[in-house]
Image: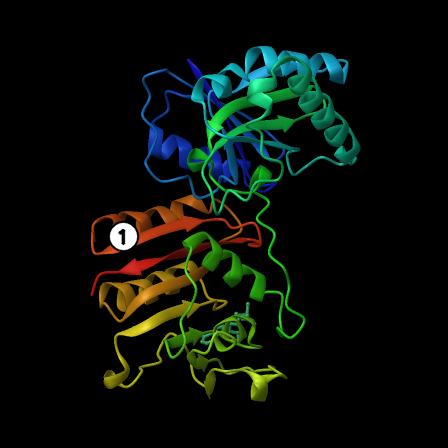
Amino acid sequence: MSNILFLCKERFEDSLSAEITSKCGAGGLLKKSPGLVNAEFPSDQLLPEKFFIFERQRVENAVFIQEGNLGNMARDVVKNILPGITRSEMQWTLHVFPPEDTGISIAPKIKYFKKQLIDFCRDHFGRVARRFVLDADLRKENMMVLNICMLQEGLWGAAMLSENLSDPCPGGCHRMIFDEDAPSRSFLKVEEALDIMKTKPLQEERVFDLGAAPGGWSYAFLKRGCIVTAVDNGPMKIMSLNSLPGKLVHVKADGLLYEPESRLLPADWLVSDMLVATGKNFALIKNWLGGKRARKFIINIKLPQVEPYPVIKPMEEWLNARPFIHYNIRQLYHDRHEVTLFGTVDI
Ligand SMILES: C[S@@+](CC[C@H](N)C(=O)[O-])C[C@H]1O[C@@H](n2cnc3c(N)ncnc32)[C@H](O)[C@@H]1O
């Protein structure tokens, strides 16, 4: 059996479990606790190529080390998990994180544990320690990761290749920096999606932003020089508009019915953050992506209160049947009761 620990947003443990069972069959044993799903699979179980929608981070082939004196725990990690890193000959970094639910802050404990671990490694395994990179940015470089989830009762850890992490940030906390000129916190969601797509909008690219008000997403594209059509009956509130390099047209209309002039299609970007039911978003996806009306897309999908996965599953099936659409659906760190669909369309 192999053990995989999945971190998720708190209160989405059932959604993640439903998704895992739907995609991997009922063979795996799933144990849930706040912000965590611990899955035990038969060793020959194949996992889907894509990350699960509701996972925030994963610890593959996780080894459990019982709570105790932190120095002893660090030694146990070095003895039981570090060999995976020693063998690889690659550079490596250390991620230690709590699950999201941790009521009392365990930040000081984590800081002390990391120090114990690095010191012990330096004192006893100099060659491996010389390959250690402190606070590596895994968005920019691949390396091994000593990936550790710290709990009250012990820790789960594994040596993993950074490209196998569900997110390059420790524990999947993909925190973006807010721009004070952005008119809404939603700005963070689109920035995170762009960061994960490893794409920067280009000057002069044409963007349709549906459900745009007050303008956080539009702002993200305008500041990069794009030509943005913002569709929303609500008011746009971008105060710094005149100093931005991009151009904005605000169309007061229903984004579900909005028809751009055909000469403007296909667009470079369709982005949508409309507060509409999942079924309506599905119709929008079929129309815009199925109709090859945009090359790149970021679509935020609001979830129903109960059992979100069954309403997303038909979308995945529809998208999977269209190989010209390259997509991911993820619950981003900055998402709330929603998930984000992003990707590209071959045109
Ligand atoms: C979460 S807010 C969007 C925030 C925006 N992305 C930002 O960054 O500031 C949702 C928006 O969807 C808009 N909306 C809801 N239904 C819509 C529809 N059918 N057509 C256009 N906009 C819609 C609402 O007016 C609201 O402004």
| Point 61% across, 16% down: residue | 77
Q: For mark 1, does the 10 Å Cα neighbourhood hold few (<14), some (14 to 19), or many (20 or more) residues?
A: some
The vertical placement of 320 against 212, above or below, is above
For disc 1, does the CB lie below 8 Å from ligand 1? no
Quadrant of the image occupied by residue 240: bottom right
Q: Is residue 38 left or right of residue 52?
A: right
Q: Which residue is mark 1?
A: 319
What's under tag 1, amino acid-wise?
A: Leu
Q: Choose top left, top right, bottom left or bottom right for residue 126.
A: top right
Give the residue displayed 63% in from the left and 59% down from the top.
177
**197 or 36, which is in the foreground?**
197
x and y percent of residue 257 in the render? 35, 78
Query: As drawn, is 287 to the left or to the right of 18?
Result: left
Residue 60 at least partly seen: yes
Relative to 158, residue 246 above or below? below
Say above or below: 272 vs 171: below
Q: Nearer the viewer, residue 220 or 292?
A: 220
Q: Position of residue 118 (x, y in %)?
A: 67, 24
Picture quarter with the C terminus:
bottom left
- Residue 307 % position (x, y): 47, 44
Q: Is residue 251 visible?
A: no
28 with respect to 72 (left or right): left
Residue drawn at point x = 56 percent, y = 11 percent: 80
Is 210 above or below relative to 116?
below
Number of numbered discs overlaid on the protein picture: 1
Where is the N terminus found, in terms of image quarters? top left
Residue 32 place in picture, x, y as percent: 56, 28
